[in-house]
Each structure stands twice: as C-alpha cells, then as structure tokens.
Image: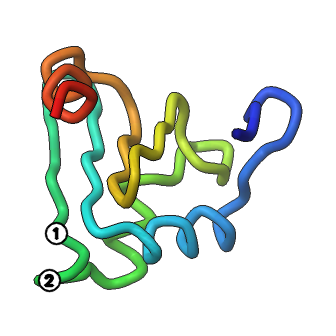
Amino acid sequence: MVNAKKEAIGEKEALALARRSDEIYAMRGKKVVHVDMKAQPPDSATLKSLIIGPSGNLRAPTLRVGRTLLVGFDEATYRKILSG
C-alpha cells in the first residue's frame, strides 16, 4: 500500500500501474468511465486523461482490487467492486 500524501505516484509509474490492470474505473463527479484493458486498451493520452490529475500525479483516491484499478470515488462503483 502506498500513501500518496507521503509518496506521490508520478505519470510514468501511474501509467505502468494502469497497464498492468485488467479493468479501470475512472470516476469524476457522477461520471464513471469503465475501461477494459484486455479487450481494448486506450492510447497513452486517453489513459493519462483518466488517471492523472492536475498535479501530474495519479489522481486520488486510487484503489487497486486484484487486477481492477479504481481512480476517483463513486459509492455505487466501490460497492459493486468491493462486494464482488
């Protein structure tokens, strides 16, 4: 586990983490974007727009559950992933 307040995850490391995932759920406000990294991985620019914040680091909160990466927060999505 990494505490991003103490150790920021930069763009290069964040993109590598995302590419090692099977699925990504990127959440901003009420919008949830699901990416199936096995079936149709996005290009680097698209992936960066989903997971990198204005600071140039991985957006918070970020949670990895198995091979699923959750970036941002949406209660319904967290319930779905964490209960299954």
When asked about the image quadrant of residue 4, the answer is top right
User: Which quarter of the figure is the C terminus placed in?
Assistant: top left
Residue 50 image position (x, y, % from top left): 35, 54
Q: Note whether 78 is above or below 64 in the view shown.
A: above
Residue sitting nearer the eye, 16 or 67: 67
When asked about the image quadrant of residue 35, the answer is bottom left
Q: Secondary structure at mark 1?
A: strand
| Mark-to-mark CA distance, 1 and 2 | 6 Å
Q: Residue at x 26, y 79 (%)?
A: 42
Residue type, numbered disc 1:
Asp
Residue 20 image position (x, y, % from top left): 46, 74
Q: Note whether 46 is above or below 43 in the view shown.
A: above
Q: Note whether 26 is above or below 78 in the view shown.
A: below
Residue sitting nearer the eye, 27 or 67: 67
Q: Answer yes or no: do the residues labelled 1 and 2 have beta carbons within 8 Å?
A: yes
The residue under label 1 is 36
The residue under label 2 is 40
Mark 1, residues whose alpha carbon is within 10 Å: few (<14), some, or many (≥20)?
Answer: some
Q: Residue at x 41, y 81 (%)?
A: 44
Q: Residue at x 88, y 31 (%)?
A: 6
37 vs 6, left or right, is left
Q: Secondary structure at mark 2?
A: loop
User: Which quarter of the figure is the N terminus placed in?
Assistant: top right
Mark 2, residues whose alpha carbon is within 10 Å: few (<14), some, or many (≥20)?
Answer: few
